[in-house]
C-alpha cells in the first residue's frame, strides 16, 4: 500500500486578497479588513503586516497609522469571500481526486500515488499557477506524509520566500530541521494554553514535541495530543474527510449597529436571523425540531442596566419552512422581551436536526394526527416548492424576496461603512468596462 501524502493549500491573506482582486489601484497599498460593525482588524494585506498591524486591534486605535500610511479600510464582505472561496475549491477539485475543504481559505489534497507522475514540488507549483490563473488568488502549498506535517510545511512556504510558495516535507531529515526552528505553538492543534503547559515540561519546539513519549503525552494530556505527536513523526493518524461533518446546530446572530430599544426593531432582527437560519438549514438538507432565541445588552457598558436571557421551543414536527421557524421565534421573543433596556445583540439557534424522512412522530405528537395523510403530503409539497423558489430567487443575484416581518428600514443592522461591491454575486455590482 503506497505511503499517504497530503498537500495543504492555503490562500494568502485571503480576505485582503479578495478585496485587492478587483481593485488594481490597491496593489501595493496597505489594506485591512474589519470585523462585524467595523470594530476590529480581522485580516491584513502583506503591506499592512509589514507595518506591524495586528489582528484583533480596535480600528479606533489605528487612526494615526491609517492616516500616516494611507491604509485602505474594508468592511467584511462575506458574499464576495464565500464565492471566491468556492471558485478556489472547485479549481482544486480539478487538480486532485480527493479534496477536504478545511476552511474558507484552506483545503487538504490527497496526493497518494501522484509521485510516479509528477514530483511533489512540481505539483505544488502547478497548483499555485492554476489557482492564480483561474481565480487571481495566490496560494501556498505544504506537502507531507501527515496532515499535521503538511500544516507545518505550509507555514514554512509562507514564511520563507526562497521556497517560492511550496515546501515538500517528504524527507524525514527536512521534517526534523523545520520542526527544530518552529515553536511548539505553531503545531496544528496546540493552542496557547496547551503550549504553556508543554513549555513548563521543557517542550519548547515542534521537534521537542515530536521526541516526546506518546504514551506519556496521552496520560498527561489526551489522545488528541498523542495523535499529534505520532503525526509529527510521520505516522498518519488523521484521514482526509471529503464530506463535511453534519452540523448539529445552526446559529445566526449579529451585534447591532446601534442599540435596539423597541420591541418592533427586535422582532425585525429575530425575523431576519430566523429566515437566514432556515436558508442555511435547507442548504444542509436538514429539518429542525428545536429553536432557541437569545437577546442581551452589552456586558462592556457598566453604566447601563444589564439584561440577558434566552428561551427554547419545539415545533410539533421538524421543519425547514421559514414561516414555521419565524412563528416559533416570535413566540419565544414575546416571553423574553423586557422594556427599558438597550439591547446590543440577538440571535437564533436551530438544533435537534433531522435528515429528510428520518423523524418518526410519536402517537402523542400534536399536529401529526390532525390532517389526513394526503392533505399533509400536499402541504409538505407546497412548502418545499415555495421555499425552493424563495432560495432560487435570493441566490440568483438579481433581486431579493424577504418576509414583511424583517422590516424595510433596518436601523439596527450591522455597520458596514467600508463595504465593497458584491462583484461576483450581484448583477448590479459587476465591473463595467467603459
Image: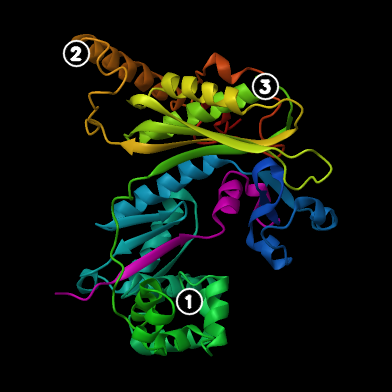
Q: Identify the residue position indicated by label 2 in the image.
A: 373
Look at the picture and state if 329 lies above or below 233: above
Spatial separation of the CA atoms under disc 3 and disc 2: 39 Å
Mark 2 or mark 3, which is nearer the start of the sequence? 3
Q: Residue at x 66, y 19 (%)?
A: 264
Q: Which mark is residue 163?
A: 1
Q: Residue at x 43, y 70 (%)?
A: 151
Q: Residue at x 49, y 26 (%)?
A: 275
User: For the C terminus, which image quadrant?
Assistant: top right
Q: Is residue 313 left or right of residue 284?
A: right
Whether the residues at callouts 1 and 3 have beta carbons within 8 Å, the answer is: no
Which x, y percent locates residue 23?
63, 45
Q: Which mark is residue 65?
A: none
Q: Is residue 353 left or right of residue 82?
A: left
Q: Residue at x 40, y 90 (%)?
A: 211
Q: Observer-nearest residue: 363 or 323?
A: 363
Under circle 3, the secondary element is: helix
Task: Return the residue found at the far front.
Answer: 364
Q: Observer-nearest residue: 269 or 333?
A: 333
Which x, y percent locates residue 362?
24, 27
Question: Is 10 one of the magenta-colored residues?
Answer: yes
For disc 2, the neighbor class at 10 Å (few under 14, some 14 to 19, many from 20) is few
Whether the residues at callouts 3 and 2 have beta carbons within 8 Å, the answer is: no
Q: Which mark is residue 263?
A: 3
**Magenta stretch in the rendered image:** 1-29
Under circle 1, the secondary element is: helix
Amino acid at each position: 500500500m503506497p505511503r499517504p501524502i497530503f498537500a495543504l493549500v492555503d490562500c494568502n491573506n485571503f480576505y485582503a486578497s479578495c478585496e485587492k482582486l478587483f481593485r488594481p489601484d490597491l496593489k501595493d497599498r496597505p489594506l485591512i479588513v474589519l470585523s462585524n460593525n467595523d470594530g476590529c482588524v480581522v485580516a491584513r494585506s502583506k503591506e499592512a503586516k509589514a507595518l506591524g498591524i495586528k489582528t484583533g486591534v480596535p480600528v479606533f486605535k489605528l487612526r494615526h497609522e491609517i492616516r500616516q500610511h494611507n491604509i485602505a479600510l474594508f468592511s467584511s464582505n462575506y458574499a464576495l469571500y464565500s464565492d471566491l472561496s468556492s471558485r478556489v475549491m472547485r479549481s482544486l477539485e480539478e487538480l486532485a481526486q480527493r479534496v477536504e475543504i478545511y476552511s474558507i481559505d484552506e483545503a487538504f489534497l490527497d496526493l497518494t500515488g501522484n509521485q510516479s507522475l509528477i514530483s511533489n514540488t512540481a505539483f505544488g507549483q502547478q497548483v499555485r499557477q492554476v489557482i492564480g490563473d483561474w481565480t487571481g488568488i495566490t496560494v501556498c502549498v505544504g506537502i507531507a506524509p501527515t496532515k499535521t506535517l503538511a500544516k507545518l510545511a505550509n507555514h514554512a512556504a509562507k514564511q520563507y520566500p526562497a521556497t517560492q510558495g511550496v515546501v515538500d516535507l517528504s524527507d524525514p531529515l527536512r521534517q526534523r530541521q523545520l520542526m527544530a526552528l518552529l515553536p511548539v505553538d505553531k503545531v496544528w492543534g496546540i493552542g496557547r494554553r496547551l503550549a504553556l503547559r508543554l513549555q513548563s515540561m521543557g517542550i519548547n519546539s515542534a521537534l521537542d514535541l515530536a521526541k516526546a513519549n506518546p504514551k506519556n503525552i496521552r496520560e498527561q494530556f489526551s489522545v488528541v495530543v498523542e495523535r499529534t505527536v505520532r503525526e509529527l513523526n510521520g505516522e498518519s493518524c488523521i484521514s482526509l474527510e471529503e464530506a463535511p461533518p453534519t452540523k448539529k446546530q445552526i446559529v445566526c446572530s449579529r451585534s447591532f449597529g446601534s442599540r435596539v430599544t423597541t420591541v418592533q426593531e427586535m422582532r425585525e432582527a429575530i425575523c431576519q436571523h430566523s429566515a437566514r437560519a432556515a436558508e442555511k438549514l435547507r442548504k444542509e438538507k436538514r429539518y429542525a425540531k428545536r429553536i432557541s432565541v437569545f437577546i442581551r445588552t452589552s456586558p462592556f457598558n457598566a453604566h447601563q442596566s444589564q439584561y440577558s436571557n434566552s428561551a427554547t421551543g419545539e415545533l410539533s414536527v421538524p421543519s425547514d419552512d421559514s414561516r414555521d421557524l419565524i412563528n416559533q421565534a416570535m413566540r419565544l421573543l414575546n416571553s423574553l422581551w423586557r422594556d427599558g433596556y438597550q439591547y446590543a445583540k440577538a440571535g437564533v439557534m436551530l438544533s435537534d436536526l433531522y435528515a429528510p424522512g428520518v423523524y418518526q412522530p410519536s402517537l402523542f405528537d400534536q399536529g401529526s394526527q390532525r390532517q389526513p395523510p394526503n392533505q399533509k403530503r400536499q402541504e409538505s409539497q407546497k412548502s418545499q416548492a415555495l421555499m425552493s423558489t424563495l432560495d432560487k430567487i435570493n441566490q440568483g443575484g438579481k433581486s431579493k424576496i424577504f418576509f414583511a416581518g424583517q422590516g424595510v428600514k433596518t436601523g439596527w443592522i450591522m455597520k458596514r461603512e467600508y463595504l465593497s461591491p458584491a462583484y461576483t454575486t450581484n448583477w448590479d455590482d459587476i465591473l463595467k468596462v467603459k
